Image (cartoon, coloured by chain):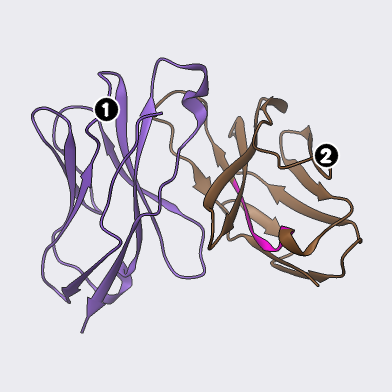
Chain colours: A purple, B brown
Amino acid sequence: DAKTTQPNSMESNEEEPVHLPCNHSTISGTDYIHWYRQLPSQGPEYVIHGLTSNVNNRMASLAIAEDRKSSTLILHRATLRDAAVYYCILRDVGRDSNYQLIWGAGTKLIIKP
Amino acid sequence: DAGVIQSPRHEVTEMGQEVTLRCKPISGHNSLFWYRQTMMRGLELLIYFNNNVPIDDSGMPEDRFSAKMPNASFSTLKIQPSEPRDSAVYFCASAQGYIITDTQYFGPGTRLTVL
């Protein structure tokens, strides 16, 4: 399975944009990039996913590098409620194990008031 | 929709006892996943079902663990006998299908402590 690398933690100020990086240099052409986050004492929740093009939804934006070896999750205006562990995950569309999300350690995002 | 429902939310038991964790997936979802989360190992997939059939149980740690899905609205994860190293938060998740873009929806988890 392709691997992702994320910083262990990041800090940001409230109401400022946050850019969470993810490196996936061994990504294959059929790997989708998924982001989930886990708020304290809760189960993970879906944030966004993409394949090649940048994606936007009500929660965040996903910017994917042209060579797809890295991506960035963008929270446009972070609030205290965005403090969580953010996971960058690859899912391969072509393999039997495509049901699975292979979880790394994630990035702990700390929001300062 | 109530989301994925798990019970109990907390369970404290003694080593050697049987533990049963329960999950009700979101109505209409065809895939169900059991995960375990610990500080040391992070989030690990234990087993997943599609249309009530176990597809891959390679993540189940050993024979003391078993999971069933008797119908589309209920699943159990059983540990017998339990050991202190089984202490963890156990999550159940469901998804509408099994295509690559299907979102997994997680329950609140069951925090298991084995003394």
Position of the N terminus of chain A, as image quadrant, is: top left
Residue at the far bottom in the pictured view: A113
Q: Is residue A34 above or below residue B8?
A: above
Label 2, label 1: how many angstroms apart (C-alpha)? 34 Å
Q: Which residue is rendered at x = 51% and y = 64% of the image?
A: A42
Where's residue A74, x and y in %? Answer: 16, 53
Q: Is B60 left or right of B97, judged from the image as shown?
A: right
Which corner quadrant of the image does residue A28 belong to? top left
Q: Is residue B46 magenta?
A: no
Asked if residue B111 can be seen in this view, the reply is yes
Which corner quadrant of the image does residue A32 belong to? top left
**Tag 1: residue type?**
Ile
Q: Is A93 left or right of A110, judged from the image as shown?
A: right
The residues colored magenta run B86-92
Q: Which residue is rendered at x = 69% and y = 31% of the image?
A: B57
As helix, strand or loop, the secondary structure at mark 2 comes to loop
Q: Is residue A61 above or below residue A31?
A: below
Report the residue marked by disc 1. A27
Where's residue B51, x and y in %? Answer: 67, 25
Q: Is residue B102 above or below residue A72?
A: above
* Marker disc for residue B63: 2
Asked if residue B27 can be seen in this view, the reply is no
Principal secondary structure, stretch drawn in magenta: strand
Position of the C terminus of chain A, as image quadrant, is: bottom left
**Tag 2: residue type?**
Asp
Where's residue B81, x and y in %? Answer: 89, 54
Give a yes or no on whether discs 2 and 1 share a subunit: no
Chain letter behind tag 1: A
Q: Is A66 left or right of A60, judged from the image as shown?
A: left
Mark 1 neighbour density, 10 Å: few (under 14) some (14–19) many (20 or more): many
Residue at the far top in the pictured view: A94
As helix, strand or loop, the secondary structure at mark 1 comes to loop
